[in-house]
Amino acid sequence: MVFMSSKGDLAKYPFTKEAQKYIENLNLDIRDLVSPKYSSLLRRGGERVIEALEKGIVSYKDNNYVEELLSFPLARLLVESLGDDYLRRRYAVAESKRVDKLLAMEENDKLIYIARETFGWDIRKAPRQSIGGRFYDYELNVVNYLEYAPYFQDKYWKLVNRVLHKGYVYLRKNDVARLISEAVKWRLMEKKGKPPVLPPEIKEMVNIIESKLVAQKKDRGIDGGFGEVSRDSFPPCISKILSDAIAGKSMSHHARFTLTSFLINIGVSVDELVEIFSNVADFDEELTRYQVEHIAGIRGGGTKYTPPTCSTLKTYGLCEKNELCQGVKHPLNYYRNSLRRQKGSEKTVI
Ligand code: SF4
């Protein structure tokens, strides 16, 4: 059976090899995209990006397959023309959510086909059997599994919690859909080269998106980059956890708690913290906000938590001690000492 042969499939999965080939064969120039023939295309391309910003998920419209397909590279062009990491990430996450939802409704063979043909994964149907009361329909080479599963924070994805047989991980359909959508997200997060010179019609759409982007970043306190907080004064343990969060790496519960409680105590806002965690796989805005507010003392018993002491962080394997940590017993003390040192050196300069 041939998969990805219908325009509907290409519209749903515009990141696949087949969809890319279809677009290439049309041999369109950027000016064609703003011609009257494609007048609704720019609108839909812009809509995809605005949906990503405002709703966190891109919708799927099945009323015009070609428009739906072509609006994908156009939306990407709009995103890249602004060169903003926040927008790029937000768009990638929103497209990956759309893909996850659609794939979960497909036949097993189609997921296998996409995973093999577009991502080159070694994946096959598993012999139908129940393990621990669950049916697994797929076997994925553990090497491919480890490309994306470590980005998910849920214990469910840890290799030790999976059924592994002769180098293959047993998976269910939702697992494969989640892994493929994660792969899509990382592809969309890759920076492209310099965008081409845009015709005025597209520039107009870019301006609309930019104004929404600026407003959202302002609302969420993102542009200030922690306001008065001095990142240069962070202890090495916190700098490391923060970089991991921004890079979207998998983080332990202890690491998340330490980072959140530290940043809350030095004046970083709940919105900024939610934004920091938005890069981590399996990000759930509502849940993250709830957890951050709990640590900030806005919810629960009203207790504002402080980060663990250095000795506790050592036992968690989170200490990244450097020479300035000498005699420091708490990361917040490191930060305050470092700020004092900074102020002292500023005075000397004056
Ligand atoms: S000694 Fe303390 S402040 Fe320094 S890296 Fe370790 S845990 Fe962080």
Image (cartoon, helix red, strand yellow):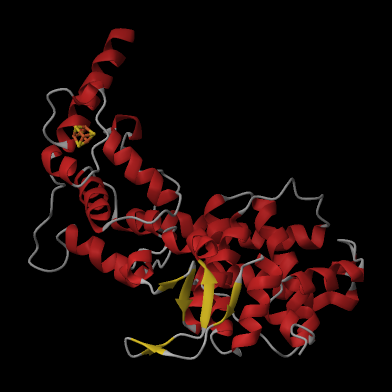
Would residue 15 be seen by someone viewing this image from the given angle? no
Determine the quadrant in which ligand 1 lies: top left
Point out residue 282 in the picture as x, y percentages from the top left corner.
41, 68
Identify the residue shown where x is 45% and y is 47%. Answer: 223
320 over 277 or under it: above or below? above
Point out residue 167 in the picture as x, y percentages from the top left corner.
49, 66
195 over 169 or under it: above or below? above
Place residue 79 in its image quadrant: bottom right
Place residue 113 in its image quadrant: bottom right
83 over 21 or under it: above or below? above
Point out residue 187 in the picture as x, y percentages from the top left corner.
62, 59
Identify the residue shown where x is 71% and y is 75%. Answer: 44
Q: Is residue 315 left or right of residue 78?
A: left
Q: Nearer the viewer, residue 107 or 73?
A: 107
Would residue 72 be seen by someone viewing this image from the given angle? yes
Q: Is residue 62 left or right of residue 67?
A: left
Image quarter of the N terminus = bottom right
Image quarter of the C terminus = top left
Identify the residue shown where x is 67% and y is 54%. Answer: 80
In the displayed orientation, state which residue is furthest to the front: 166
Q: Is residue 97 left or right of residue 134?
A: right
Numbered-mark total: 0
Place residue 3 in its image quadrant: bottom right
Identify the residue shown where x is 90% and y is 62%. Answer: 29
239 over 205 or under it: above or below? above
